[in-house]
Image: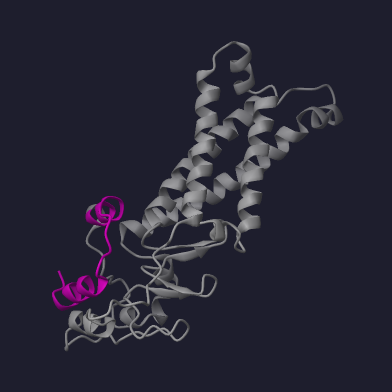
Amino acid sequence: MVQNVFRSGFLVRVAHTLLTWIITVILFLHNTSLRRCEEQGELLLPALFFLLVVLSVLLYFAVSLMDPGFVLTDTVKGAQSPNEEMEAMIPQSSTARVRRCGYCLLQQQPMRAKHCHMCKRCVHRFDHHCPWIENCVGERNHRWFIIYLLVQLLTLLWGLHVALSGISPALTWEQWFRVNGFLLAALCIVGIFSVVVVLLLGSHLYLISINCTTWEFMSRHRISYLKTCKDEENPFDRGIFCNLWDFFCICRTVMWEKVYHRNTLNPV
């Protein structure tokens, strides 16, 4: 884990953490609703806000440093080879061809996996490489990424309310900017991040509800196992409720080859 911290994403993580705590300090030091609660001896709301910020930072590092589901290339001696195992899953009548990775030399790339050029590894159920966390979002950390976005959005919206509560009136514009300058800067940053997180969370929840990844949605025409499907057809879609249940409640590696061929050979 120490090696992961000092990868190329170290500066991004440090910048995110510093920015988070600088804005938090600004919200606590200015005459905001949090500061007024402290002065009145009501510490519940300030404590809850502080704990929410801590939780968002912890989730950020958890998602950032977590294995997103890298495809292992090592095989156990005497065990069934990846080629044999994958070929056993693919019926002879299937139109899906065997996929290989020419970068990490995988002879058999699992369905819905993709090679990430930033991480230099293939990732199970690859969604996208996120520059914000400097890590891939894949099968193992995708649900945690969504939970992080939810917590981050709650923190940002609360911070937006707190920043607005601290804006003070003044006699002149110059004096107003001098008094509220730091709060205005915090307000702009929090507002921009709030919009980004809302859009990101909304798009991900939509894709999760139809059991589609960002990569599949953006590059459908170039993915071999989706080329033969109709424009509106998704072989992994089991309905909104089942898709959400599987995503948030089923913590196991899915053999997408079986799901794909079961749905394509027996369409509903």
Residue shown at 55%/39% (left/top)?
156
Colour option used: one colour
Picture coordinates of residue 68, whole percent (x, y): 42, 62
* 200 in relation to 184, above or below: below
Of helix, strand and loop, which mostly describes the magenta segment? helix
Q: Residue 246 lies in magenta, yes or no?
A: yes
Picture coordinates of residue 89, whole percent (x, y): 19, 79
**Residue occupying the far front of the picture:** 77
Q: Residue 119 lies in magenta, yes or no?
A: no
State the extent of the magenta-drawn residues as a range. 242-268
Image quarter for residue 264? bottom left
Picture coordinates of residue 243, whole percent (x, y): 26, 57
- In front of the other: 49 or 18: 18
* 56 in relation to 90, above or below: above
- In front of the other: 195 or 104: 104
Query: Is 38 displayed left or right of 112 in the figure?
Result: right
Picture coordinates of residue 173, whole percent (x, y): 83, 30
Could you tell me how many numbered marks the image carries? Answer: 0
* 149 in relation to 7, above or below: above
Image quarter for residue 255? bottom left
Residue shown at 49%/38% (left/top)?
55
Image quarter for residue 222? bottom left
Query: Is 120 displayed left or right of 167 in the figure?
Result: left
Residue shown at 53%/24% (left/top)?
47
Query: Is 91 displayed left or right of 191 in the figure?
Result: left
Q: Which quarter shows the C terminus?
A: bottom left
